[in-house]
Amino acid sequence: GVIHRDLKPENVLLAEANEGLTAKILDFGIARADPELTGHGNLTMTGQLIGTPMFMSPEQALGKRDIDGRSDLYSLGVVAFKCLTGQLPYEESDTVGEIIVSITTKEPRNPVALRADIPPGVAQWLKRALAKSREERFPSAKEMAEALEDACDVR
């Protein structure tokens, strides 16, 4: 029931665990409760831009009030894109305004064009993770993880 709102590589820590590595999410300083899941209202104002622009979902970049967990899943898709290609899904921009225009109107770069050895299933996974419409994205982290396992054929 918590929306982080600032997922980015700096806020993901890989730590040793009994089974190997585990990911831990850090810095919940701008997180908020999902009102649909908790019954509590939003603590920020409509139109307020909160987070790191390059990793924001389109709805977060537009300052919409009704963001949900799929916004964080979009951000996680941006993190995965950066991990796999070494670059962000959109061309580097000099201003926050240019970044927001890219996130809200342009299609992400093809990850295979940046790194040819990315499997087609993983490229499709990234495309869905970075969908402009949250309805086209993965509905939950569990489904997102399962789809990635399928794309990597590691089950």
Image (cartoon, grey):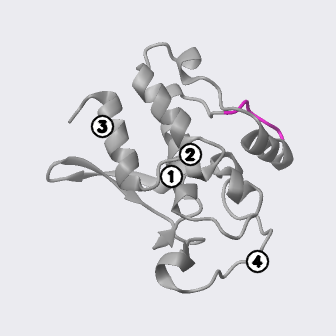
93 part of magenta stretch: yes
Q: CA distance from mark 2 to mark 1?
A: 12 Å
Q: Identify the image quadrant of residue 149.
A: top left
24 part of magenta stretch: no
Label 3 CA crowd tier, 10 Å (few <14, some 14–19, many 20+): some
Is label 4 in a helix, a strand or a loop? loop
Q: Hey, what amino acid is under mark 3?
A: Glu
Residues in magenta?
90-94
The residue where tag 4 is placed is: 45
Mark 4 and mark 2 lie on one chain; the one further toward the N terminus is 4
Q: Position of residue 52 (x, y in %)?
A: 67, 54
The residue where tag 1 is placed is: 73
The residue where tag 3 is placed is: 149
Q: Is residue 104 left or right of residue 36?
A: right
Mark 3 and mark 2 lie on one chain; the one further toward the N terminus is 2
Q: Position of residue 94 (x, y in %)?
A: 83, 39
Q: Is residue 94 left or right of residue 36?
A: right
Q: Hey, what amino acid is under mark 4?
A: Met
Q: Are marks 3 and 2 in contact (CB under 8 Å)?
A: no
Q: Is residue 76 left or right of residue 23?
A: right
Q: Residue furthest bottom?
A: 40
The residue where tag 2 is placed is: 136
Mark 1 and mark 3 lie on one chain; the one further toward the N terminus is 1
Is label 1 in a helix, a strand or a loop? helix
Q: CA distance from mark 3 to mark 2?
A: 19 Å
Label 4 CA crowd tier, 10 Å (few <14, some 14–19, many 20+): few
Q: Identify the image quadrant of residue 148.
A: top left
Q: CA distance from mark 4 to mark 2?
A: 26 Å
Q: CA distance from mark 4 to mark 3?
A: 38 Å
